[in-house]
Image (cartoon, rainbow, N blue to C red):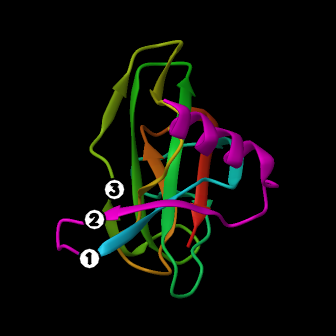
Amino acid sequence: MRKLLLVLLALIAFPASAQVTVLSGQGSDGNLVSLKACDQRKVFDNALTTSTPVLLITGVSAKKIYVCGFYVAVVNTTAVQFTEGTGATCATGTTNVTGPMQSSANSGIVMSLAPFAVSFTNTAADSLCIVGTTGQTASGWISYTIQ
C-alpha cells in the first residue's frame, strides 16, 4: 500500500507535459515493458457518421497512442467505436480498436480513468478516430499519451 501511495504521489508531482515511466513489468514475451502514464487529454464534441471516422488524436511518426480513460456522452441511442488509421479521417489502413459500444439515449460510455495507459493503436504513427451512427453527436473526453 505504501508503494502505491508513493507512485501516486510521484504522478502528481510531475508536470502534465512530462513523459514519465513509473514502473516496469514483464510482457507476455518475457521482455521488460514500461507502464505508461497519461500526460495529455482532449475534450471533443463531434458529429458522427457511419462511413467516415472523426479524427480525435493525430498520430506521431514511430509512436503509438496509449489511453488511460475516456467518456463518451450521446443524446440519442447510438453505437460508437474507436478506429485507427492514417489520413485526415483514419480512412487509410482503418482498423477497429474497439467493438461497437452501444449507448442508450442521454447516457454515456466510460472506460474509467486508470493510472496507467493501455495501447489503443497497434500500428505506430496511426491516428485515433471515432465513428458512430450518422446524425448523432458524441461529446466527451479522452486521457492519453503518445510514446
Circles 3 and 2, Cβ within 8 Å, touching? The answer is no
Q: Is residue 40 left or right of residue 78?
A: right
In front of the other: 130 or 124 = 124
Q: Is residue 39 left or right of residue 127?
A: right
Q: Nearer the viewer, mark 3 or mark 2?
A: 2
Classify mark 1: residues with Cα within 10 Å, few (<14), some (14-19) or many (20+).
few
- As shown in the figure, which amino acid type bears the numbered disc 3? Val
The answer to whether residue 9 is seen in the rendering is yes
Give x and y (percent) for residue 134: 46, 40
Circles 1 and 3, Cβ within 8 Å, touching? The answer is no
Q: Nearer the viewer, mark 1 or mark 3?
A: 1
Cα distance in 3D space between marks 1 and 3: 24 Å
Classify mark 2: residues with Cα within 10 Å, few (<14), some (14-19) or many (20+).
few
- The part of the chain drawn in magenta is 1-30
Q: Which residue is mark 1?
A: 31
For label 2, the SS is: strand
In front of the other: 36 or 32 = 32
Above or below, 119 against 12 in this view is: below
Q: Residue at x 54, y 24 (%)?
A: 74
Q: Earlier in the sequence, mark 1 or mark 3?
A: 1
Q: Residue at x 50, y 52 (%)?
A: 67
Q: Which residue is mark 2?
A: 26
Q: Earlier in the sequence, mark 2 or mark 1?
A: 2
Q: Which residue is mark 3?
A: 97
Q: Residue at x 27, y 44 (%)?
A: 99
Give x and y (percent) for residue 8: 63, 39
